[in-house]
Amino acid sequence: MIVFLKGQYVAKSPAVVWMEVNGIGYEVGISLHTYSKISQLEKGTLLTYLQVKEDGFSLFGFFDEEERTLFMQLISVSGVGASTARMMLSSMKPEEITRAIITENERELERIKGIGAKSAKRLILELKDKLMKSKPTENLLPTKNNNLENDALNALVSLGIARNTGYAAIQKALKHDSTLTLEDLIKHALKNL
């Protein structure tokens, strides 16, 4: 198993990088997320995942462990292959994908090319619990300072509702009507539970 490559970036594109390591050239598939991190670098280290299939080997590279771990979790889901997982990581940052899965935001996942309603449901069903165990939920909720949403979320939490479940219910209510008052938002969110 090739765990990482450390060497010179010979050629880079948003999907592929060629790395020279001790005189050997490796072609490594990457996401836009990784490309944005290495685009200005001449050399560096990529964490890797080697996929072995009957028609050949494919090497995928990642700038950080968070992205590699999420990639491996994504490809563990039935119907999600390496190219789909790489497309997901190119469309959204790892923390955004994790947030969408934990908060059961199917629409956000469906915006990614290759992810339909069934795939989005399957991703949530198979990965939500795993991701919740590995990530503190508070860090995954949006950091934008929206007092109405925060007040509604705090009210739901004080009623004994889990923070991530409350957040998902609030987002669902806001999708239907973004002009709700605090009281109406809480009522609609409770109906969505």
Image (tube, grey):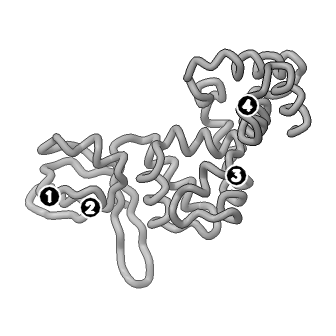
Q: Which amino acid does label 2 sit on?
A: Val
Mark 2: few/some/many CA within 10 Å (<14, 14-19, 20+): some
- The residue beneath circle 4 is 167
Q: Which is closer to the viewer, label 4 or label 3?
A: 4
Q: Position of residue 24 (x, y in %)?
A: 13, 63
Disc on the earlier residue, 1 or 4? 1
- The residue beneath circle 1 is 11
Work out which residue is located at the far front of the displayed protein and give it.
Answer: 179
Q: Position of residue 70 (x, y in %)?
A: 52, 48
Which labelled disc corresponds to residue 112? none
Which labelled disc corresponds to residue 124? 3
In which quadrant of the rendered view does residue 170 lie? top right
Q: Distance between the residues labelled 2 and 4?
A: 37 Å
At 49% from the left edge and 47% from the top edge, which residue is drawn?
A: 69
Mark 1: few/some/many CA within 10 Å (<14, 14-19, 20+): few
Q: Please name whichever residue, 81 or 182, is drawn nearer the observer in this view of the structure.
A: 182
* Marks 3 & 2, CB-CB < 8 Å contact: no
Q: Please name whichever residue, 82 or 190, is drawn nearer the observer in this view of the structure.
A: 190
* Marks 1 & 3, CB-CB < 8 Å contact: no
Q: Position of residue 157 (x, y in %)?
A: 82, 20
At 45% from the left edge and 59% from the top edge, which residue is drawn?
A: 87
- The residue beneath circle 2 is 16
Disc on the earlier residue, 2 or 1? 1
Disc on the earlier residue, 4 or 3? 3
Q: Which is closer to the viewer, label 2 or label 4?
A: 4
Q: Which amino acid does label 3 sit on?
A: Ile
Helix, strand or loop at mark 1: strand
Q: How far apart are marks 4 and 3 (CA)?
A: 15 Å
Q: Which amino acid does label 1 sit on?
A: Ala
Work out which residue is located at the far bottom of the displayed protein and give it.
Answer: 55
